[in-house]
C-alpha cells in the first residue's frame, strides 16, 4: 500500500479482505484455558512442559477443530490412522515459526509441502474422569499408536523449585520458545480457565480487537501511529509500539484481533507498557 493512500484507508477502516477461512463447526470444543503462574504454587503438584507457539487443535475423533470450533483442513494423510477418540495439541511449525503455522492453517487447501513442515504436538487426551497424570500415559499411548513422525507427544517433567523453573523458562525463551505450561497432576479435565493449568512466560500477553487506527507523526507520518483496541472485558487503550516498518505500512484492519504483551496493570486496569506482538489468526477466535 502506498503511503499516500494509507490515511484514506484509515478513514474507511478497510485494509482488504481476510483470507478464506475454514467453515465453522457445529459447536466449539470445551477446552481448558490456563491461568498465569504466580510463583507461590506447590510445584510438586504440577507437571511442566514447553508451551509451543502454534495453533491449538482439537481432534474430536473424526475431524480436527480450532479452539473456536472451526473445522480445519489438513491433508488426508496428515490425520490418517488417528483414533476415534479425542485428544488435543498444538499445530506447530517450529521455533519462531508461528506466522508460518498460521498461514498454513488459514488456507483451505495449503500445499502438502507446507503441511510436511507441521507437527501436531499432543499434550492432552480428554478422557474423563482420569487425572492428568494418567492422561499423560493415555496421550503418549495414542501417539505411539498413530506412529507418524509429525504427531509427537509433548514431554512432561517435574521441577523441584521456582528457581529451577525460572532457569528452564530462561533456556526455553533463549531458544525462541514461547514459555512453559504447568498441569496439576491430580486434576480432572475441565473446560474453562482455572489454576489446574498454568502458563509461565517472560511477559504477560492477551488479545484485543482493533477498533480504530491512528495515523502517525514525525517519522511515522502517512502511516500507522497506533492501534486503538478493546479487550473482551471492554477496556480500551492504544498500542503504539512493537510494530515493524512493514506493519506500519500495512497495519491490522479494524475488526481483527491482535496479541499484545504487557507488564502488569495500572490501578485502572490498563495494561502497562503494552506492545503489539502480532495479528491473531481468525481460526483462533
Image (cartoon, rainbow, N blue to C red):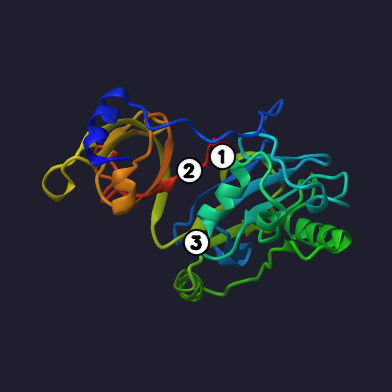
How far from the left and from the top, in percent, is residue 154? 69, 64
- Callout 2 secondary element: loop
- Callout 3 secondary element: loop
Query: Which of the two discs, 3 and 1, labels the residue nearer the N terminus?
Result: 3
Q: Which residue is mark 1?
A: 284
Label 3 – label 1 distance at C-alpha: 17 Å
Q: Quadrant of residue 208?
A: top left
Q: Nearer the viewer, mark 2 or mark 3?
A: 2
171 lies left or right of 111: left
Crowd class of label 1 (few under 14; some 14 to 19; many from 20; radius 10 Å): some
Q: Residue at x 56, y 44 (%)?
A: 194
Query: Quadrant of the image for the N terminus?
Result: top left
| Residue 96 seen anywhere in this rendered image of the structure | yes
Q: Are marks 3 and 1 in contact (CB under 8 Å)?
A: no
How far from the left and from the top, in percent, is residue 274? 29, 48
Crowd class of label 2 (few under 14; some 14 to 19; many from 20; radius 10 Å): many
Q: Is residue 42 shown above or below 260?
A: below
Q: Residue at x 71, y 59 (%)?
A: 116
265 lies left or right of 27: left
Label 2 – label 1 distance at C-alpha: 7 Å
3 lies left or right of 251: left
How far from the left and from the top, in percent, is residue 242? 30, 53
| Residue 121 seen anywhere in this rendered image of the structure | no
Label 2 – label 3 distance at C-alpha: 15 Å
* Badge number at residue 178: 3
Could you say which is closer to the camera, residue 275 or residue 48? 275
Q: Residue at x 61, y 49 (%)?
A: 104
Query: Which of the two discs, 2 and 3, labels the residue nearer the N terminus?
Result: 3
Q: Is residue 123 shown above or below 162?
A: above
Crowd class of label 3 (few under 14; some 14 to 19; many from 20; radius 10 Å): many
Q: Which residue is mark 2?
A: 280
Amino acid at each position: 500500500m502506498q503511503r499516500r493512500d494509507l490515511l484514506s484507508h484509515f478513514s474507511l477502516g478497510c485494509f482488504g479482505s481476510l483470507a478464506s477461512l475454514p467453515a465453522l463447526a457445529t459447536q466449539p470444543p470445551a477446552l481448558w484455558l490456563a491461568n498465569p503462574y504466580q510463583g507461590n504454587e506447590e510445584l510438586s503438584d504440577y507437571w511442566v512442559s514447553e508451551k509451543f507457539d502454534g495453533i491449538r487443535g482439537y481432534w474430536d475423533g473424526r475431524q480436527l477443530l480450532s479452539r473456536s470450533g472451526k473445522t480445519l483442513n489438513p491433508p488426508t494423510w496428515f490425520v490418517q490412522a488417528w483414533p476415534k477418540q479425542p485428544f488435543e495439541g498444538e499445530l506447530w511449525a517450529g521455533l519462531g515459526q508461528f506466522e508460518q503455522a498460521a498461514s498454513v492453517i488459514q488456507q483451505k487447501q495449503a500445499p502438502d509441502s507446507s503441511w510436511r513442515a507441521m507437527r501436531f504436538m499432543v499434550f492432552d487426551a480428554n478422557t474423563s474422569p482420569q487425572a492428568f497424570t494418567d492422561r499423560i500415559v493415555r496421550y503418549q499411548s495414542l501417539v505411539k499408536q498413530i506412529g507418524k513422525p509429525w504427531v509427537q507427544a509433548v514431554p512432561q517433567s517435574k521441577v523441584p523449585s521456582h528457581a529451577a523453573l525460572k532457569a528452564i523458562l530462561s533456556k526455553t525463551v533463549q531458544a525462541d520458545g514461547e514459555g512453559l505450561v504447568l498441569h496439576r497432576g491430580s486434576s480432572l479435565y475441565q473446560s474453562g480457565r482455572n489454576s489446574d493449568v498454568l502458563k509461565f512466560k517472560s511477559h504477560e500477553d492477551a488479545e484485543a480487537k482493533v477498533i480504530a487506527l491512528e495515523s502517525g507523526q514525525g517519522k511515522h507520518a502517512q502511516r500507522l501511529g497506533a492501534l486503538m483496541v478493546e479487550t473482551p472485558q471492554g477496556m480500551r487503550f492504544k498500542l503504539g509500539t512493537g510494530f515493524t516498518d512493514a506493519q506500519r505500512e500495512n497495519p491490522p484492519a479494524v475488526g481483527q484481533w491482535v496479541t499484545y504483551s504487557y507488564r502488569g496493570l495500572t490501578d485502572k486496569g490498563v495494561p502497562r507498557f503494552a506492545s503489539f506482538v502480532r495479528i491473531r489468526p481468525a481460526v483462533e477466535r
